[in-house]
């Protein structure tokens, strides 16, 4: 019987003992399941090191938990050796939605039992940090900063509160002076930029389709550059973002490629929800198919 290591994060929004136990019980119908609860990067590294021969690692948590596990496996050189599973027990669960996983934890565990897998891409930034879902600079990073403390208090409603704070800022900020280059070609300039989003998954912030054409296994990263247009245009942009039509606007440039480079003003960044200090240069490249995950058969 193959062996799985199920890793739970006690700080994940839906990771209570009953939910974790129900998932583990489901998985044990087909696998020998070891469990670990990790609250810090050090505990996570120790748990993975203690089980070097497992066939798969199942993340019981949200986007942050998945990022932490994948990053740790990448640093250890083990991504090619283990399958990665995800049971969405977090607050936003954006990457789970990107790969078509059910919201219900038991149903998501059943996806693993069904055995359908797919090669998944990763992004790496200039410092070697892994991006599983989405990184963004500008207003998107300010949204993550605003939502982070609110998520702990309000759970999923923290995303809404953070979005409201960000919308207020987005209506008034002048934006940043930036140059964006995708695969060696400079994106046409239209003045200051509100946000650059680059990613592998479609969703951020608990379901907003910021990169609606992204496919986590197509070997390309998606890039959306949003310019600081007039106030009326910004209001319409916010409405079209909710309807997934924003990437067709004239003040939005949407591209796909292998490498993106951004330079100019010092601008804040968030990578899979992890806040990174403002910098004058940011870059990412795609690493196609370096991870294999359990996914829904229809994905």
Image (cartoon, grey):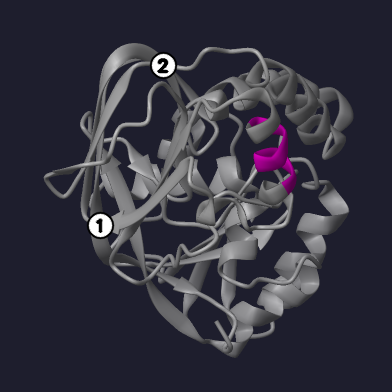
Question: Of the numbered discs in the image, which one, if any, rests on residue 273?
Answer: none
- Residue 266 included in the magenta stretch of the image: no
Q: Is residue 172 above or below residue 235?
A: above
**Range drawn in magenta:** 234-239
Q: Which residue is mark 2?
A: 176
Q: Position of residue 296 (x, y in %)?
A: 60, 82
Which tag, 1 or 2, sits closer to the chain's start? 2
Question: Of the numbered discs in the image, which one, if any, rests on residue 257?
Answer: 1
Q: Is residue 258 above or below residue 127?
A: below
User: In this view of the protein, can residue 90 be seen by the observer?
Assistant: no
Looking at the rendered structure, the secondary structure element under dot 2 is: loop
The answer to which image quadrant residue 263 occupies is: top left
- Residue 236 included in the magenta stretch of the image: yes
Q: Main secondary structure of the magenta part?
A: helix
Query: Who's the residue at 59% across and 46% down the image?
Result: 63
Query: Who's the residue at 26% across and 41% down the image?
Result: 187
């Amino acid at each position: 019987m193959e062996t799985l290591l199920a890793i739970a994060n006690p700080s994940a929004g839906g990771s209570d003992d009953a939910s974790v136990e129900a998932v583990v019980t489901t998985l044990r119908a087909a696998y020998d399941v070891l469990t670990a609860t990790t609250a810090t990067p050090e505990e996570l590294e120790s748990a993975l090191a203690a089980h070097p021969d497992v066939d798969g690692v199942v993340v019981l948590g949200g986007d942050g938990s998945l990022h932490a596990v994948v990053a740790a496996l990448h640093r250890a050189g083990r991504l090619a050796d283990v399958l990665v599973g995800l049971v969405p027990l977090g607050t936003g669960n954006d990457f789970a939605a990107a790969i078509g996983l059910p919201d219900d934890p038991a149903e998501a565990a059943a996806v693993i039992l069904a055995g359908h897998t797919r090669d998944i891409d990763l992004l790496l930034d200039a410092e070697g940090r892994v991006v599983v879902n989405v990184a963004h600079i500008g207003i998107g990073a300010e949204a993550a900063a605003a939502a982070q403390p609110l998520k702990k208090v309000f759970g999923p409603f923290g995303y809404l509160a953070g979005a409201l704070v960000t919308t207020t800022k987005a209506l008034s900020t002048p934006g940043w002076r930036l140059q964006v280059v995708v695969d060696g070609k400079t994106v046409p300039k239209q003045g200051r930029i509100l946000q650059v989003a680059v990613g592998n998954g479609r969703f951020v912030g608990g379901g907003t389709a910021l990169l609606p054409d992204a496919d986590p296994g197509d070997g390309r990263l998606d890039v959306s550059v949003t310019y600081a247009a007039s106030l009326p245009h910004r209001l319409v942009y916010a409405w079209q973002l909710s309807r997934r039509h924003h990437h067709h606007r004239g003040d939005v440039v949407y591209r796909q490629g292998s490498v993106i480079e951004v330079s100019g003003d010092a601008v804040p960044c968030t990578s899979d929800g992890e806040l990174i200090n403002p910098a004058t240069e940011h870059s990412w490249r795609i690493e196609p198919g370096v991870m294999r995950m359990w996914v829904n058969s229809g994905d």
